[in-house]
Image (cartoon, rainbow, N blue to C red):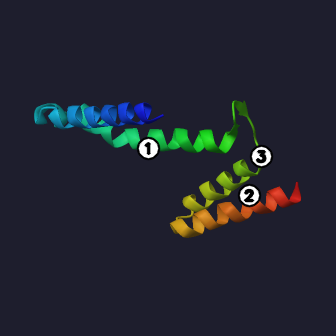
Amino acid sequence: MWPAVIVASLGCYAIKLVGLSVPQKWLANRRVMHVANLLPVALLTALIATQAFTSGRHLQIDARAAGLLAAVIAVRFKAPFLVVVGLACLVAAVVRLAA
């Protein structure tokens, strides 16, 4: 297992080094800046969808989906982050208890 950890660490370091070696002119490109701003949002959305709607390799709609819906509604009403998380947990727990 240690060789895999070492190889992965070296790979991460190499990717970081390549990122630091990119010329500033390329980074100042308007399209690159736009993609760099949108990429974290897309990755976080994919992570949330994967965690909320899958179980192993199967699609599963359960209490997590209800919690996510409650969180989306709370965000829509501009609730503070802790309120959003707490509400999502509460709704998911109530749905699990009811099921």
Q: The C terminus appears in which quarter of the rendering?
A: bottom right
Q: Residues within 10 Å of mark 1 (few under 14, many from 20)?
A: few
How many tags in the picture? 3
Residue at numbered disc 2: 92
Q: Position of residue 71 (x, y in %)?
A: 62, 58
Q: Residue at point 39% right, 38% down?
A: 39
Going by the numbered disc 2, the residue's amino acid type is Ala
Quadrant position of residue 86: bottom right
Of the image marks 3 and 1, the number of the one nearer the N terminus: 1
Res 34 seen here = yes
Q: Where is residue 15? Give x, y as percent.
A: 28, 33
First of labels 2, 3 by sequence position: 3
Distance from disc 2 to disc 1, alpha carbons, whole Å, reads 24 Å
State the separation of the CA atoms marked 3 and 1: 24 Å
At 11% from the left and 33% from the top, the residue drawn is: 25
Front tag of 2 and 1: 2
The residue tagged with tag 2: helix, strand or loop? Answer: helix
- How far separated are the C-alphas under marks 2 and 3? 9 Å
Badge 1 element: helix
CB atoms at circles 2 and 1 under 8 Å apart? no
Q: Residue at x 71, y 50 (%)?
A: 64
Indicate the amino acid at tag 1. Val
For label 1, the residue is 41
Q: Position of residue 81 (x, y in %)?
A: 52, 65
Check disc 3 and give the amino acid type: Asp
Query: Pointer 2 and pointer 3: residues touching (CB < 8 Å)?
Result: no
Secondary structure under the numbered disc 3 in the rendered image: loop
On screen, 17 above or below 64? Answer: above
Where does label 3 land, which residue? 62
Q: Nearer the viewer, mark 3 or mark 1?
A: 3
